[in-house]
Image (cartoon, rainbow, N blue to C red):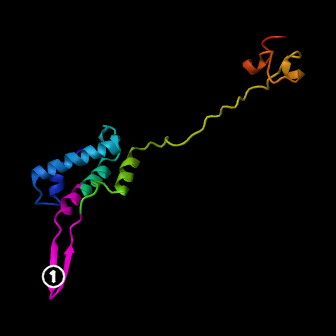
Amino acid sequence: MSITVDDLRVFAPGIDEAKAQAMIEDALGTAALLAPCLFEDEFEHPAAAKAILRAAILRWDEAGTGAVTQMSAGPFQRTVDTSSPRRRLFWPSEIDDLTKMCRTSGSGAFTVDTVPTGPAIVHADICSLRFGAAYCSCGAALTRGGALWEQ
């Protein structure tokens, strides 16, 4: 997946090439941390990822173009700032969308059953458990089946 300066010029014809290239490198580097699968050869959604990255870069490009307007009437003044400071390159919704593209259908929580499903443990007639002990002396607890010793 790649983005070129020409991809941005469709929406921002006046963008400086050096600035655009630096912004593209920053966006691709950040995206690689968030969703490494974007750069794999078998990636399934390159157009969607490109749209998200392009929108973020264009938003970043437009962030500094706001105007500051000042009005005054006598002792009263009013200042209107329409610029938006850059905080993060990607919005949380864009981060979610990029990471969702890398998820596989098999990922998620699962359990492993550790309870034995084999036959019941059969202790020997002379096993200590049969005489009230808290331990097995015949070895059936080790084999999970029949007695190992004291047969």
Where is residue 119? Give x, y as percent: 77, 25
Q: Which residue is mark 1?
A: 71
Q: Is residue 116 left or right of residue 32?
A: right
Task: Please state which amino acid type lies under the numbered disc 1.
Answer: Met
Where is residue 44? Give x, y as percent: 35, 44
Magenta-colored stretch includes residue 72: yes
What residue lies at 73% left-to-right and 18% top-to-bottom? 142
Mark 1 Cα-neighbour bin, 10 Å: few <14, some 14–19, many ≥20: few
Question: What SS does tag 1 mark?
Answer: strand
Where is residue 85? Give x, y as percent: 23, 62
Give the quadrant of the C terminus: top right
Query: Could you say which is closer to the camera, residue 101 or residue 127?
Result: 127
Question: How many numbered discs?
Answer: 1
Q: Is residue 128 left or right of residue 43?
A: right
**Relative vertical location of residue 23 with respect to residue 148 in this rendering, above or below:** below
Query: Could you say which is closer to the camera, residue 89 or residue 102?
Result: 89
Q: Residue furthest front?
A: 75
Q: Residue 124: which quarter of the image?
A: top right
Query: Could you say which is closer to the camera, residue 143 or residue 37?
Result: 143
Magenta-colored stretch includes residue 118: no
What residue lies at 29% left-to-right and 40% top-to-bottom? 39
What residue lies at 27% left-to-right and 54% top-to-bottom? 89
Q: Residue furthest bottom?
A: 74
Give the quadrant of the N terminus: top left
What residue lies at 35% left-to-right and 49% top-to-bottom? 98
Q: Is residue 39 left or right of residue 4?
A: right
**Relative vertical location of residue 34 with respect to residue 60 in this rendering, above or below:** above
**Relative vertical location of residue 149 with respect to residue 87 in this rendering, above or below:** above
Q: Residue 56: which quarter of the image?
A: bottom left
| First to last magenta residue range | 57-84
**Relative vertical location of residue 102 with respect to residue 124 in this rendering, above or below:** below
Where is residue 146? Give x, y as percent: 79, 17
